[in-house]
Structure formats: C-alpha cells, structure tokens
Amino acid sequence: MSGLYRLPGLFLTALCHAFVIYHMAEHRYSKKKFALYSCIFAVVFVSMMGYGYAAGGWVSFFSYIGIVVELFLYSCIASKDGFPKKCFLFITYFCLFSVLDNILKLMVRLFLSQISEVAGYYAAILLRSIVLLLLSALYKKYAAVFLRSLIDSGKRWWNPTLIALLFYLLQATVSVLNAGKFIPDVYLLIAFAAISFLMCVVYGVVFSNIRYMKKDAEAALVRQNAEYLSNRLSVLQRAEEANRRLRHDMRHHIEVIAEYAKTGNTSAILAYIGEYNTEISEAAVKRYSENRTINSILSAYAGKAEEGGISFLAQCNVPKELKIREIDLIALLGNLLENALHGCQESGKEKPCMEIHIRLKKNLLLIVCNNICSDKLKLSGSLPVGKSIGISSILSVCQKYDGNLDYKIEKDVCSACAVLNL
C-alpha cells in the first residue's frame, strides 16, 4: 500500500497522541500555545512516518525511532511535571499504545481477513483511537487527581519508570517477532494480552503501595496540625495565666494610682498607666487570621521565631473558611514557614527576619514568604537547587490546585510565592 493512503490515518494518530498528552500531563502552556505546538508536532509526525512508509526498509525503522523521540520531546515540552514523572507517563502511554496497536492489527488480521488492506489499516486505527480516548477519559476521572497529588520527586518516580521501561522492552521484543512473522498470529495475540494483563497487575501493586505511603504522609500532616494546635493551646494557657495575675494585681495598681492622684503627680500617673498598658499588650494573645488552621500555624511559628531571636511578621487577609483541604493547607504553609525558619537560622546574619503575607484575591490564594537566607542558597529555574522534600510537598499542593510555586533571591532575601486556584 502506498504511503499516500496512510496519511489520513497518520494524521488521526497524531491528533490522538496530542489529545491524550493534553489530558495526561500537567499543562505548561495555554490552550492556544499547546494547539500551536500540537500542529507542529502533527506536521513533523505525518511527514516523517509518511516518508518512512514510502521508502520502506531501514528508512522506515529509523523513521519510527524518530517519531518516538519526537513524541517524547513533545510530551516533555507540553508538561510541567518533573522529568522522572514525565518519563514514567510517556513510557507507560507509549507502551500501552504499542500493545493496543499490535493487538488490534492482529485481531483485524485474524477476524477481518476478508476486508482489503486499506480497510483493515483504517479499522485498526479507528478502534485504537476509540480505545485510547476511552482510557484517557477513565484516567482523567479516576487516576489524574491521585497522580497529581503525589510529590513530584525523582526518588518516587524513577522506580515506576524503570518498571514501565521493562514492560516496553518486553512488548517491543514481541513486536519485532510480530514484524518478522516468527510466531503465529494467535500466539502473538495471547502474548500481547498477557503483557497487558501483567502490566495492569504490577501497576496496581505499585500504586497501591504509593497510596498507602500517601496516607502515611497525610497522617504525619494530621500529627503536625495537632502539634500546631497544641502550641496554640499552650499560648492561650500562658495568656490566661498572665491575665489572671493582672486581675489579681488590679487592687494594688489602683492603690498606686490613687496615691499619685492625691499628690497631683499627673506625669507619674500617665507613666504608670503606660507601663501597665504595655504589660497588658504583651499578655494579650495575638490573632493572625480568622481561619483556625492558618492562625494555629502562624502562632506556632511566631513562637519558634521568638525563641530563636528571629523577627517575625505576618499579614493575613482571608475568610474563616477556605476551599482547600486542611491537610493541604498544613503541608503548604507549614513547609513554607519551616523552610523560612531554617533559612534564617542557617544564614549567619546578625538580624534574621521572616515575614509572610497571605490573601485571597477572587479565587486565587496568594502566599508570599520572605526570609533572610544563606549566601550558599542557589536557584535552578524557579526552585532551589537540590530541593528538599518540604519544597516538593509545597509544589505538589500547588500543582494539585492548578497553581504554581516560584522562588527568587534578591539581596540575601529568599522570596517564595505560592499561588493556588481555589
């Protein structure tokens, strides 16, 4: 069959790739920009594969390798996920695509042998596209949110990526046997079906373990929130004791003021009242936010900063209720402040300080955390070099709520800006 007849099918395949990658990846660009890159990808894809089919032989093989590389680069450009996660998603998708492609071609060859080669070619492509779109819809509904919530760290994603690569190599070996007609079609169909089943079982075990790990991480955040609330309770208890002492001493204060009044010493009265007012202010509990979780976290870190001799400033303008899970809010705000606290402690500067500004603007939750930092702190893009688990956790929450995280360093001040779309 001439390569010319294949062009519409290749174009449909390119569109299917673009659609799946759009719903599989974390979007880096707007829809218009993604559509532009998709058009470029489709033109190169159709041109390269069309030429490969027309030339045949080794040219066809190298064209196939070329479109695999192009598809991988396209998925990397379109997604803002970490590189290990990009590799895992791409290899998994391409392995699934290849298995489906081979299974459907074999089924058409076995069960629809009476139709023409052209009809068989397009029947396999249409069936493959329908199945991939269906799987893409199932992924978006059941798996996308879960995968998005996982911390985007290399240590977590390289192992599943290796498993995906092993499955791809296994199906590639069977594909070579299929292309060389070394094994009867029926046995090949059974082999591909077995690979698909085994892949689903192994992936089920892997992500079941990851789900348990995620639950453990959430339990740790619950314990962290309990610690914040415990610290908050301690602050309230100390304030209550101070207020009780002030109330007890009130009679003595009145007697002192009365003695000053008898002698007409107005300046002494004013000075005494000012001193008393300062004492009351210091005993008062400072309220940072109407939101209970935010208030507890800010109060806890205000106490830690005070103990470490670090100046602490917090400005918060958010309502009592926010459309964000408490666990996510703890992970985000707690890690931001923890990193800022450590940054001040490691800076070696004479007057360490940290400040945080939180506000809700329409549906966007904006959090900016600034702190004095060490001269050794460097950035790679918009994140610190060798980012910690804490930063990965912050980034994971931002991605979960279609937001972003950016770090900047100016004049020994590290500024972290987290934006969440609520």
Image (spheres, rainbow, N blue to C red):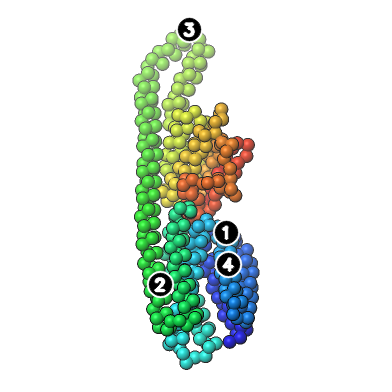
Instruction: Report the Cα–Cα distance between label 2 and label 3.
Output: 99 Å
Label 4 crowd (10 A; few <14 / some 14-19 / many >=20): few
Against 191, residue 236 (above or below) is above
User: What residue is drawn where x is 62% and y is 39%?
Assistant: 410
Left or right placement of residue 237 versus residue 289 in this view: left
Residue 135 appearing in the image:
no
Point out the frontmost of discs 3 and 1.
1
Point out the frontmost of discs 2 and 3.
2
Mark 1 sits on what residue?
28
Instruction: Report the Cα–Cα distance between label 4 and label 3.
Output: 93 Å
User: What residue is drawn where x is 49% and y is 28%?
Assistant: 309
**Mark closest to the chain's N terminus, 2 or 4:** 4
Against 170, residue 309 (above or below) is above
Res. 57 image quadrant: bottom right
Res. 66 image quadrant: bottom right
Instruction: Report the Cα–Cα distance between label 4 and label 1.
Output: 20 Å
Q: Are marks 2 and 4 in contact (CB under 8 Å)?
A: no
Q: Give the amino acid at mark 4.
A: Val
Q: Give the amino acid at mark 1.
A: Arg
The secondary structure type at the circle numbered 1 is loop
Q: Are marks 2 and 3 in contact (CB under 8 Å)?
A: no
Mark 3 sits on what residue?
263
Label 3 crowd (10 A; few <14 / some 14-19 / many >=20): few
**Mark closest to the chain's N terminus, 3 or 1:** 1
Mark 2 sits on what residue?
195
Q: Give the amino acid at mark 2.
A: Ile
**For this rendering, which residue is in front, 221 or 201?**
201
User: What residue is drawn where x is 38% and y is 19%?
Assistant: 250
Label 1 crowd (10 A; few <14 / some 14-19 / many >=20): some
Mark 4 sits on what residue?
69
The secondary structure type at the circle numbered 4 is helix
The secondary structure type at the circle numbered 3 is loop
